[in-house]
């Protein structure tokens, strides 16, 4: 990652750098969307955020969006000991912390690079792509917006649809 490179090659404090990079006025950007809260509340199972940002920032973003109560926890850059997505080791560490087989876990992401390691471990993958591009074979589902996730959970895999 970019932050990993800076930390390896420059004399900076990791906590200070990561917190500085994520010091943004989030309340100026996103807004609450009742459809998102409704979608998240109707999804079965536990929900976690897996992010290359610090947990403090992720919780702040969830609060601004009005959906923090629907998440059970956050796996952040510090959980990964400054190694983040798409490092397969971090995915393995998250799965171990969840104590669940990969086949029962879903990763929803807008980055194809982040979905590939999840699929290699056996997770179901959902790609958020607003422009509706054709997905690569390691993507199980595509959605244009997170509010579509509830319907996606009930759909068969893309390969089964063909």
Image (cartoon, rainbow, N blue to C red):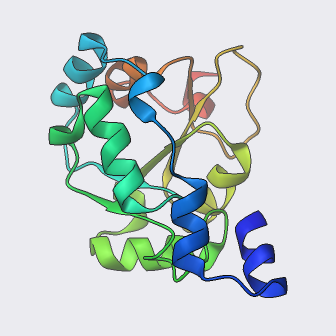
Depicted 51 relative to depicted 145: above or below = below
Q: Is residue 130 left or right of residue 35?
A: right
Examine the rendered structure and indicate whether residue 87 appears above or below residue 152: below
At which x and y percent is residue 20? 57, 60
Would you identify the image quadrant in which residue 27 lies?
A: top left
Q: How many marks?
A: 0
Q: As rendered, which of 100 and 77 lies closer to the eye?
A: 77
Residue furthest toward the right?
A: 9
Image quadrant in which the C terminus is located: top right
Q: Position of residue 119 (x, y in %)?
A: 60, 56
Q: In front: 49, or 28?
A: 28
Taking depth in this image into account, of 134 and 29 the one nearest to the observer is: 29
> Would you say residue 52 is visible in this rendering?
no
Question: Residue 34: x percent and y percent?
Answer: 23, 12
Q: Is residue 63 visible?
A: yes
Picture layout, residue 1 above or below residue 39: below
Residue at the (23%, 22%) spot, across then down = 37
Q: Residue at x 51, y 63 (%)?
A: 19
Q: Is residue 71 left or right of residue 149?
A: left
- Residue at 62% across, 36% down: 110
| Quadrant (top left/top right/bottom left/bottom right) for the N terminus | bottom right
């Amino acid at each position: 990652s970019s932050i990993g490179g800076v930390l390896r090659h420059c004399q900076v404090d990791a906590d200070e750098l990561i917190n500085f990079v994520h010091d943004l006025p989030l309340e100026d950007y996103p807004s609450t969307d009742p459809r998102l809260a409704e979608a998240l509340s109707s999804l079965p199972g536990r929900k976690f955020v897996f992010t290359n940002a610090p947990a403090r920032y992720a919780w702040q973003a969830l609060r601004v969006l009005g959906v923090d109560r629907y998440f059970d926890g956050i796996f952040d850059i510090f959980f990964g000991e400054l190694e983040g997505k798409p490092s397969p080791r971090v995915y393995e560490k998250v799965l171990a912390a969840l104590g669940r087989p990969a086949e029962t876990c879903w990763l929803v992401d807008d980055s194809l690079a982040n979905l590939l390691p999840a699929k290699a471990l056996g997770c179901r993958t959902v790609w958020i792509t607003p422009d509706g591009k054709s997905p690569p074979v390691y993507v199980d589902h595509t959605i244009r917006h997170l509010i579509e996730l509830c319907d996606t959970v009930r759909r068969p895999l893309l390969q089964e649809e063909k």
